[in-house]
């Protein structure tokens, strides 16, 4: 019917609406956890697939011991540095490719060749150059996150209204002022989209890098626990990686709504 709306009726209390939304959002996760609990020990041996109850008990023990806090801090440091570098380089590179033919000619083939390569395939090479540890993880995260940010920045800069640029140039705006006062503000919505896409990719790169090229971090816990058959510990580390990516993405969304109110 024309004019139909999906908004809740006005007589529904706001608190009840938020509660219903929370239940609907998390109900599928609860179902999966319930089925997992049933399958463990029935369809699959507990030694191979520990139930969620044991996984979260192990997670609690790791938190209380302080071990998980140390390893998670190391992993998040790598994510923030690698992602931050990819944002700084990716935004300028994407805009530069869109605005300069010489920059496009220089980087176009390189980016096209880098795009289809799984970044975890570069971990052995990064270990050869930088050794096992933080530098290798940061490099892999940087490379993994770079392309989404470059592509979104490039597309945004390509679509800046030409009339606005011409008007600014006619008023005597320098190239530097044009970049910082016209082009970058106009591309922020797309840059934000690129960053949002890059956040989960950062954790994928982190896990791959720490599984192969690091002796610390949550990814290294997954590897060592799997090798020793400590599967509750392995699953607990996987849950931590997933939850960290989820909450970082939700935190970024909240930051975007508060800061970039016009996007």
Image (spheres, rainbow, N blue to C red):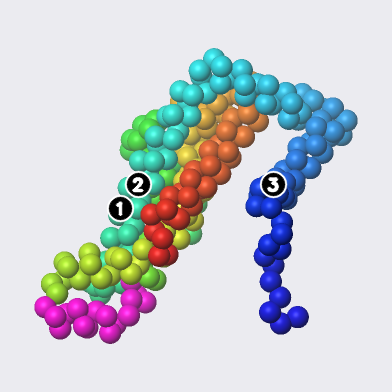
**In this view, 190 is above or below 134:** below
Mark with earlier residue (3, 2):
3
Where residue 156 appears, x then y in whole percent? 37, 70
x and y percent of residue 192 in the render? 42, 59
The answer to which of 63 and 226 lies nearer the viewer is 63
The residue that appears at 16% across and 66% down in the rendered structure is: 176
Q: Residue at x 40, y 65 (%)?
A: 262
For the residue labelled by badge 1, is the local secondary structure a helix, a strand or a loop?
helix
What residue is rendered at 67% in x and 65% in y?
Answer: 7
Quarter of the figure that contains the N terminus: bottom right
C-alpha distance separating marks 1 and 2: 6 Å
Q: CA distance from mark 3 to mark 2?
A: 35 Å
Q: Main secondary structure of the magenta part?
A: helix
Q: Residues within 10 Å of mark 1 (few under 14, many from 20)?
A: few
Circle 2 residue = 84
Tag 3–tag 2 contact (CB < 8 Å): no
- Specify the label residue 88 is tagged with: 1
Residues 232 and 213: in front is 232
Which residue is denoted by mark 3 in the rendering?
Answer: 19
Stretch of the chain drawn in magenta: 157-172
Task: Please give the name of the residue rendered at 62% of the width and 34% of the height, measured from the top-left corner.
Answer: 239
């Amino acid at each position: 019917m024309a004019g139909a709306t999906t908004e809740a009726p006005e007589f529904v209390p706001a608190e009840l609406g938020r509660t219903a939304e929370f239940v609907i959002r998390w109900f599928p996760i609860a179902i999966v956890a319930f089925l997992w609990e049933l399958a463990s020990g029935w369809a699959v041996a507990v030694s191979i697939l520990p139930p969620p109850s044991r996984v979260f008990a192990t997670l609690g023990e790791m938190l209380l011991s302080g071990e998980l806090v140390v390893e998670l801090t190391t992993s998040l440091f790598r994510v923030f540095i690698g992602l931050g570098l990819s944002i700084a380089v990716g935004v300028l590179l994407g805009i530069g490719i869109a605005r300069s033919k010489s920059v496009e000619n220089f980087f176009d083939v390189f980016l096209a060749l880098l795009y289809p390569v799984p970044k975890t395939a570069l971990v052995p090479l990064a270990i050869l150059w930088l050794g096992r540890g933080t530098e290798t993880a940061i490099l892999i995260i940087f490379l993994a996150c770079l392309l989404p940010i470059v592509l979104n920045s490039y597309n945004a800069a390509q679509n800046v209204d030409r009339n606005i640029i011409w008007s600014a140039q006619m008023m005597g705006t320098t190239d530097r002022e044009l970049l910082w006062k016209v082009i970058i503000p106009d591309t922020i919505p797309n840059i934000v989209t690129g960053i949002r896409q890059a956040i989960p990719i950062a954790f994928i790169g982190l896990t791959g890098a720490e599984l192969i090229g690091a002796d610390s971090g949550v990814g290294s816990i997954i590897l060592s626990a799997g090798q020793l058959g400590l599967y509750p510990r392995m699953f607990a580390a996987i849950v931590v990686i997933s939850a960290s990516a989820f909450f970082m993405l939700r935190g970024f969304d909240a930051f975007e709504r508060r800061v970039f109110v016009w996007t």
